[in-house]
Image (tube, grey):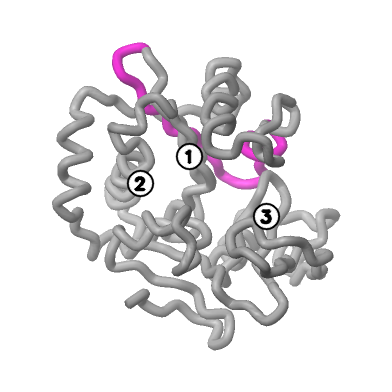
Amino acid sequence: MTQQQSIPDLYKSTTHACPYLKDRTAANLLVDPRFEVTPTLYDSLIRTGFRRNGTLYYRPHCPACLECRSVRIPVNDFLPNRSQKRVKKKNGDVRFELRSPAYSDEHFSLYRRYQSVRHGGDSMDDSDPEKYQQFLIRSNIDTFLIEMRIQRRLLGVSVVDHVANGLSAVYTFFDPEQEWRGPGTLAILHQVELTCQIEYDWLYLGYWIKNCSKMSYKENFAPLQAFDVEIGDWREVT
């Protein structure tokens, strides 16, 4: 068995305040950062509920809590609802462009505006471009960017990974002044279409917590499957 196919060491992080549920503590299982995570290994990690933050690979491992679950859309079964159809019609003037994962002042400026509104004052609201690149640009696997533009104006950017038989939505940020357009929903709808065009089966959407308003939008993309760490398999969210 080669090094690329071997099983990495996993470490548990220290506990910290949960950023999503009040009065709860959180912790993660982390892949040893010294271990080379290949695309093949990343495929296995994604299928078992892991995600990535730059070159850090993790899965929630919280004390006495299993609320945070990785979710995915079986794209061949997905049909947009009435609200999602309205979002798509409303954004008929938006075009999508694929880009390589490279730093851009234009992207970073939009990212800063988005974070100042969505996460003002917390750790995400950071003016250091190096931390931005560590979070979204640096990658050991097959990553690309999707730009959303209205004529030449940048509306939003999605960071997306190729994984086995699917795409994984790492992060999306957009112009907070254009939130009336539903750019977050628009980005996912386009990613679903792209996943189907490539003839993949899955679009991974990251983590979802049932009772967290910040994540409730993911429930609108039905059918939705969640990884159950107790049985080690995916179940449809009902």
> Which quadrant would residue 49 be assigned to in this image?
bottom right
Residue 172's disc number: 1
* Residue 75 position in % (x across, y down): 29, 59
Q: CB of mark 2 within 8 Å of CB of mark 3?
A: no
Instruction: Pick whichever, 69 or 97, lies toward us.
Output: 69
Looking at the rendered image, the quarter that the N terminus falls into is bottom right
Graded by Cα atoms within 10 Å as few (under 14), some (14 to 19) or many (20 or more), the crowding at tag 1 reads many
The residue at which mark 3 appears reads as: 38
SS at circle 3? loop
Residue 135 falls inside the magenta stretch: yes
Graded by Cα atoms within 10 Å as few (under 14), some (14 to 19) or many (20 or more), the crowding at tag 3 reads some
* Residue 220 position in % (x across, y down): 30, 59
The span picked out in magenta is 133-152
Looking at the rendered image, the quarter that the C terminus falls into is bottom left
Instruction: Pick whichever, 224 or 142, lies toward us.
Output: 224
Q: Of marks 1 and 2, which one's residue comes earlier in the chain? A: 1
Find the residue positioned furthest to the top.
152
Graded by Cα atoms within 10 Å as few (under 14), some (14 to 19) or many (20 or more), the crowding at tag 2 reads some
Q: Is residue 115 left or right of residue 34?
A: left
Distance of label 3 from label 1 (alpha carbons): 24 Å
Q: Of marks 3 and 1, which one's residue comes earlier in the chain? A: 3
Q: Of marks 2 and 3, which one's residue comes earlier in the chain? A: 3
Q: Is residue 107 left or right of residue 190?
A: right
Circle 2: residue type: Ile
The residue at which mark 2 appears reads as: 188
Instruction: Pick whichever, 168 or 238, lies toward us.
Output: 238
Q: CB of mark 3 within 8 Å of CB of mark 1?
A: no
Distance of label 1 from label 2 (alpha carbons): 9 Å
